[in-house]
Amino acid sequence: MESQLAIHNRRLEAEVLARQGLRLPPITLKCLRTAGIYCQPSVSIEHQHLAKKYVLRGVESGGAVAEVGAYASFVDEQGNSLPWLQRVDSIGVSGVHAIVVAPVLIRVQMLRIERTYDLLITRHQLAKSKDSQRPRLESSILFYGRRGSLEMELWGKDVGFRGTVCPVFYTRAGERVALPDDLQDAATRITSAVCCVGCRHCHLLGPRPISSGRTEDANADNFVKDAETCVDSATSALSARSVG
């Protein structure tokens, strides 16, 4: 029977994993750096001063070379694509691709070494804090698959199957672990991402849909209003100078 200390340690490890993402050994981190792959899975709490509310901020980042790949991105609670706040272009490849802000984020993170995959899917939301007005980050694990396998070279001869397949994960006893149905598509897309050699584009986040009327997302409305306010202020200032 497990001791109380062992149970406590396992719970603590799960909390750290949910909050910070996959814990990679130094040799793996060195390999990613050598390959020029930058993957930032962290989630932060940010304050929108004009909207007077807190949001979560995440970064879609990562890419691959033939031998290894790492990627992290985000979807909504139903596993659907989220609109990016801004797209990020850079000289290098396999780095930061886009930034997203939302009240709730589902993080999808994957590491590939040859044909072996680790997949971590976590949920992040804001929770009330007893000690301050600033909320705290509440994180939980939705799926954690280790050493999954996919006997295909999606970075090479099997590139045509990207977007249609994902690894298979097993328990220690050899039983297959099923992904939640609403996260199946996200797992398939991030599998493509960790096989995208020299990645320069987004695999999970996308542009915000443009509608003829008002935007559907409250965050988008806030950003639009902020921009309009800045334009109006600048116009008023120029008019005052002209009159003077």
Image (tube, rainbow, N blue to C red):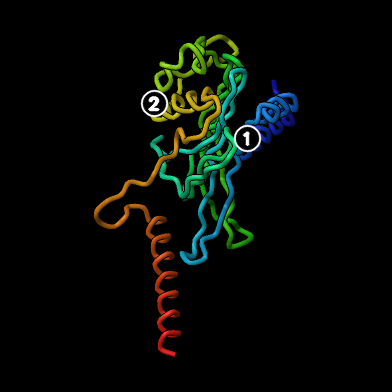
Residue 163 image offset from top left, x and y in percent: 41, 23
Circle 2 residue: 181
At x 39%, y 44%, the residue is 207
Look at the numbered disc 1 and give the secondary structure of its residue: loop
Residue type, numbered disc 1:
Tyr
Residue type, numbered disc 2:
Asp
The disc at residue 38 is 1
The answer to which of 53 and 109 lies nearer the viewer is 109
The answer to which of 88 and 40 lies nearer the viewer is 88
Q: Quadrant of residue 18?
A: top right
64 versus 171 height, above or below: below
Look at the numbered disc 2 and give the secondary structure of its residue: helix
At x 42%, y 64%, the residue is 227
132 versus 94 height, above or below: below
Of labels 1 and 2, earlier in sequence is 1
The quarter of the picture where the C terminus appears is bottom left
Residue 23 image offset from top left, x and y in percent: 67, 31
Q: Dot 1 surroundings within 10 Å: few (below 14), some, or many (20 or more)?
A: many
Residue 147 image offset from top left, x and y in percent: 59, 17
